[in-house]
Amino acid sequence: MSNLEVFLWVAFPWLCIAAFVVGIIWRWRSDQFGWTTHSSQIYESRLLRISSPLFHWGMMLVIVGHLMGLAIPKSWTRAVGLNDGIYHLIATIPGTIAGIMVILGLAGLIYRRVVNRSVFLSTSTSDKTMYVFLAAAIISGFFATLSLQVFGGPHGYDYRETISPWLRQLLILNAQPELMTDVPWQFKVHVIGGFTLMAVWPWTRLVHAFSAPVGYVTRPYVVYRSRDSRTSTHFTARGWEPVRSHTEQLADREAPSRGA
């Protein structure tokens, strides 16, 4: 095994994971004001209303599929009576649909950024960098799925014999780069693209993926002050006083004398 392969399948993933963890912690501690989606909905909402849900719901399905395929060992699915052929269908069909959703959603978001001038002018350099790495990871993964899993034969490529155990061992600091030697180049490109995206993640708007409005559920009620002139202590200029009837004006004049 060459030094380049050791670097790609051992050192590079570890460096990307370290950059991700350290970057997220640093960003949270030093730049919470910038921890946002930098929403551009104010400039354009029609395309965003279609593309954003399509992309985000598709990504949720993709993430679930990756977790199932990479974290669950092959022996576990066999133990519950799920043979390899059925697993392949369950993983490939929903995965392909989710991939199409993500591709269409991402294409709509990028098209919106390029065509709409107001949105384009509000796009920062980090946004452009993020879109490049995000598109590279998504497109490479979708291409690998189509070429190897959909059109690669009845059972496709069994990544649970190579990529899955390699990743699990990598995460427990027991690297086994030899498992990646015979992996098809399509999946190798996708793995490299995924880890590269992980490394740049903390420095882009993608950090909003780790934000959730949990505090909104337990936040205190908003107390509104009364506008009733009888209970309000707010001074109102006389020029803006409402016009009152003659009877009300006489009653106000007689009130001090009665009190005396």
Image (cartoon, grey):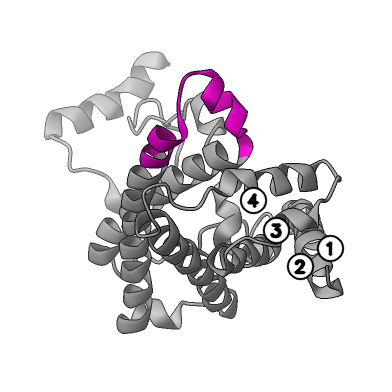
**Contact (CB < 8 A) between labels 3 and 2?**
yes
Quarter of the view holding residue 101: bottom left
Q: Earlier in the sequence, mark 3 or mark 1?
A: 1
Predominant SS along the magenta part: helix
**Contact (CB < 8 A) between labels 1 and 2?**
yes
Looking at the rendered structure, the secondary structure element under dot 2 is helix
Q: Which residues are magenta?
A: 71-90
Please say if 13 is above or below 214: below
**Contact (CB < 8 A) between labels 4 and 3?**
yes
User: Closest to the observer: 223 or 163?
Assistant: 163
Residue annotated with mark 3 = 180
Residue annotated with mark 1 = 11
Task: State left or right for residue 148 relative to residue 20.
Answer: left
Q: Position of residue 106 (x, y in %)?
A: 38, 65
Q: Position of residue 54 (x, y in %)?
A: 31, 53
Please say if 119 is above or below 37: below
Q: Position of residue 91 (x, y in %)?
A: 42, 41
Residue annotated with mark 4 = 163
